[in-house]
Image: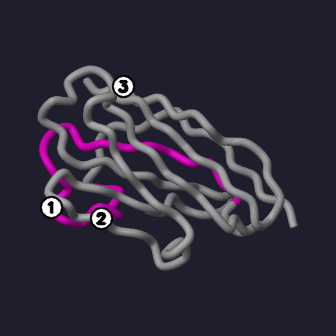
Amino acid sequence: QVHLVESGGGSVQAGGSLRLSCVASGYIDGVTCMGWFREAPGKSREGVAGIEDSGTIGYADSVKGRFTISKDKSKNTLYLQMNSLEPEDTAMYYCAAPSWGDCSGDVLDRYEYNYWGQGIQVSVSS
């Protein structure tokens, strides 16, 4: 089992910034991929950013140049720095991890992930 806990969400005005954190615990030693997803009301869950220990990093086109994903293995923590936030970024954000290993290079594919955090709300007003 892998347990994921997100923090850092909140409400900001357009153009503002937030940093999300996700602390992983449990059987995480063999997990080499983690990602961030989001789900807006009435929309399906979409991949925002993902990172593998091999160095593979992927971003959704809508966040490229604005969001940065990083990972601190010593703290078992995944981060998502979100800058230049837009109202369209408003959603519930989820941290995710596979049960073992990597994401086969497809870090934005939700079906590569087995464990999910409880989610954290990000709201951006215009």
Between disc 1 and disc 2, the foreground one is: 2
- Is 76 in front, or is 94? 76
* 76 in relation to 25, above or below: below
Label 1 to label 2: alpha-carbon separation: 12 Å
For the residue marked with disc 1, what is the amino acid? Ser
Label 3 to label 2: alpha-carbon separation: 22 Å
Residue in view at x 22 percent, y 54 percent:
52
**x, y percent for residue 4:** 41, 30
For the residue marked with disc 3, what is the amino acid? His
**x, y percent for residue 76:** 31, 31
- Is 76 in front, or is 40? 76
Badge 2 crowding class, 10 Å Cα cut-off, few under 14, some 14 to 19, many 20 or more, is many
Image quarter of the N terminus = top left
Label 1 to label 3: alpha-carbon separation: 21 Å
**x, y percent for residue 104:** 15, 61
Residue in view at x 59 percent, y 58 percent:
82
Query: Which disc, if any, is residue 57?
Result: 2
Sooner in the amino-acid sequence: mark 1 or mark 3: 3
Residue in view at x 56 percent, y 39 percent:
119
Q: Which residue is mark 1?
A: 104
Q: Helix, strand or loop at disc 1?
A: loop
For the residue marked with disc 2, what is the amino acid? Ile
Q: Helix, strand or loop at disc 3?
A: strand
Region rendered in magenta: 90-111
Q: Which residue is mark 3?
A: 3
Q: In the figure, is residue 12 to the left or right of 102?
A: right
Between disc 3 and disc 2, the foreground one is: 2
Residue in view at x 47 percent, y 29 percent:
5
Badge 3 crowding class, 10 Å Cα cut-off, few under 14, some 14 to 19, many 20 or more, is some
Q: Helix, strand or loop at disc 2?
A: strand
Badge 1 crowding class, 10 Å Cα cut-off, few under 14, some 14 to 19, many 20 or more, is few
User: From this viewpoint, which residue is outermost toward the right?
Assistant: 126
